[in-house]
Image: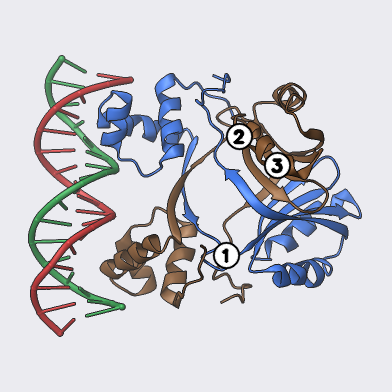
Chain colours: A blue, B brown, C red, D green
DNA sequence: ATTGAAAGAGTCTCAGT
DNA sequence: ACTGAGACTCTTTCAAT
């Protein structure tokens, strides 16, 4: 299980720098942090083996791909024991990109990326309403995404470490 | 502005494969899609120049970094014209990783990644409540993230292309 | 643990098709 | 447009400290 490990300042600096620029070379990152490229290499290897650094994910411009709409869907279940069954069905819908089991207003909280409002309507009306166990849904359409970043482990305002 | 462009099947296949594995080499990707590594290279360059492929983002295990809690915060504003001012303040809080301007129940919708429930309480109570313009907030705590993926442009169930 | 250099693997360029 | 080969850059390994 997620056992907490010890990281020194250099580990956290490497993670923070690579969160800001995942494509930096080991040599350049070493220069920036005043160690050799070899040291960066062994540290990153250690972080990968520890499972902290899991790899990289492709960053695409969804609008240029024709996906203009992001929406969040709060889902009320008939019974919360239906979570797993409903999650399995939601995962089959390619436009649903994220699903969380939540406390608070909703039982489940989904994020959907779709081409336009028409497709969103189709997902809500045709796709979701036929899944057994969903009582009703509430939709928040994103008009603008102000920012979307990784947690900043060594940011100025962050006193966590 | 986000002008829609034309992509052929190979472009979309490259994007889909790289969404699933951003670290695959051009040679291996070429083998998988039955073209040469050189072709993969020029296509990716074209996609980067078009702005569709924006790069890669580091994927970290937030739990191993000690960030055990994800929560979503629905924010009610006193006046929606305060959005920009409030967004600027929220961006200063390192644990707030995402912010959307939304229709529906809330004016703004934020995602926060924090160390534990105590820190979440501190962010909600001490950090948010002192920002002018926030009327009240509603918090959804994530108990489990079932999945978190990119939109699947060439998935079996996706008839978008 | 860190360094610096050599070996290996991947990216990038380009002439030919 | 795509290919394959050579030049170049980066990653990876390793002996020395």
Near mark 2 (Cα within 10 A), the count class, few <14, some 14-19 or many ≥20, is some
The numbered mark at residue B83 is: 3
* N-term-proximal mark, 1 vs 3: 3
* Secondary element at tag 3: helix
Q: Secondary structure at mark 1?
A: loop
Q: Is residue C14 left or right of residue B105?
A: left
The answer to whether residue A83 is above or below residue A126 is above
Tag 2 secondary structure: helix
Q: Could you tell me which chain the residue with mark 1 belongs to?
A: B
Residue B54 in the image, given as x and y percentages of width and height: 44, 54
Q: Earlier in the sequence, mark 2 or mark 3?
A: 3
Question: Does label 3 lie on the same chain as label 2?
Answer: yes
Q: Determine the CA span between mark 1 and mark 2.
A: 29 Å
Task: Give the residue pinned by disc 1.
Answer: B152
Q: Chain of mark 3?
A: B
Q: Mark 1–mark 2 contact, CB under 8 Å?
A: no
| Vertical position of residue B12 compared to residue B19: above or below | below
Report the residue marked by disc 2: B91
Q: Are marks 2 and 3 in contact (CB under 8 Å)?
A: no
Q: Which mark is residue B47?
A: none
Q: Give the residue displayed 79% in from the left and 39% down from the top.
A: B77
Look at the image and tell me in which quarter the C terminus of chain B lies: bottom right
Dot 2: chain letter: B
Distance from Cα at disc 1 to Cα at disc 3: 32 Å
Specify few, some or many for label 1: CA neighbours under 10 Å numbering under 14, 14-19, or 20 or more.
many
Q: Do the dots labelled 1 and 3 sit on one chain? A: yes
């Amino acid at each position: 299980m997620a056992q907490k490990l010890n990281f020194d300042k250099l580990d956290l600096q490497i993670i923070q720098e690579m969160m800001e620029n995942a494509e930096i070379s080991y040599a350049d990152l070493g220069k920036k942090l005043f160690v050799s490229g070899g040291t960066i290499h062994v540290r990153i290897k250690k972080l990968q083996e520890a499972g902290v650094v899991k790899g990289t994910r492709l960053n695409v411009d969804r609008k240029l791909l024709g996906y203009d709409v992001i929406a969040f869907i709060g889902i009320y279940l008939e019974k919360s024991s239906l979570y797993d069954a409903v999650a399995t069905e939601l995962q089959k819908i390619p436009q649903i990109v994220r699903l969380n089991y939540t406390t608070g207003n909703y039982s489940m909280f989904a994020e959907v990326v779709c081409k336009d409002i028409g497709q969103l309507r189709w997902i809500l009306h045709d796709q979701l309403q036929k899944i057994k166990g969903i009582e009703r849904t509430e939709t928040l359409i994103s008009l603008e995404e102000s920012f979307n970043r990784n947690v900043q482990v060594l940011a100025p305002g962050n006193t966590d470490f």
